[in-house]
Amino acid sequence: MNKLINKLPLLAFVLAAFAALAFNFPDKENTSRYGSHDSKIYDVTNVDMGSAADEYQCNGETGECLFEDEELENHVPNSWGEFDPGEALVPIN
């Protein structure tokens, strides 16, 4: 009985570690990103924000810059401004 009582803290630690790993996975996030400029839609899913020709910018503080879908219905939180694509970005439509 003493052996079991002495191992209870270790057992509690192992159980806590298991629970921490088992129940703390992040939700699968939709990482698709689209922007619209001059009635053209751009897929900027793996594109960095910046001023280079192959990047885009969200200029200003009003308007919705990025969306999660091609239909431009689901706004990406905290992406305000006017979408401004770089010269090297090609529209998808």
Image (cartoon, rainbow, N blue to C red):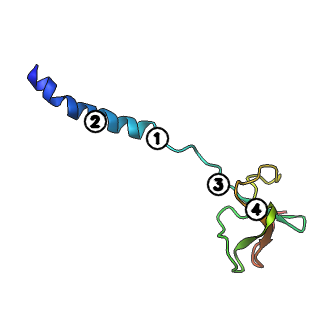
Q: Are marks 3 and 1 in contact (CB under 8 Å)?
A: no
Q: Where does label 1 land, which residue?
A: 24
Element type where label 1 sits in the image = loop
> For residue 80, which numbered disc appears in the image?
4
User: In the figure, 40 relative to 32: above or below?
Assistant: below
Q: Residue furthest top?
A: 1
User: In the figure, 72 relative to 92: above or below?
Assistant: above
Q: Are marks 4 and 1 in contact (CB under 8 Å)?
A: no
Kind of residue sitting beneath label 2: Val
Labels 3, 1: front one: 1
Q: Are marks 2 and 3 in contact (CB under 8 Å)?
A: no
> For residue 14, which numbered disc appears in the image?
2
Element type where label 2 sits in the image = helix
The percent coordinates of residue 81 (x first, y second) are: 78, 65
In percent of the image, x 65 and y 54: which residue is there? 31
Q: Where does label 3 land, which residue?
A: 31
Element type where label 4 sits in the image = strand
Element type where label 3 sits in the image = loop
Of the image marks 4 and 1, the number of the one nearer the N terminus? 1
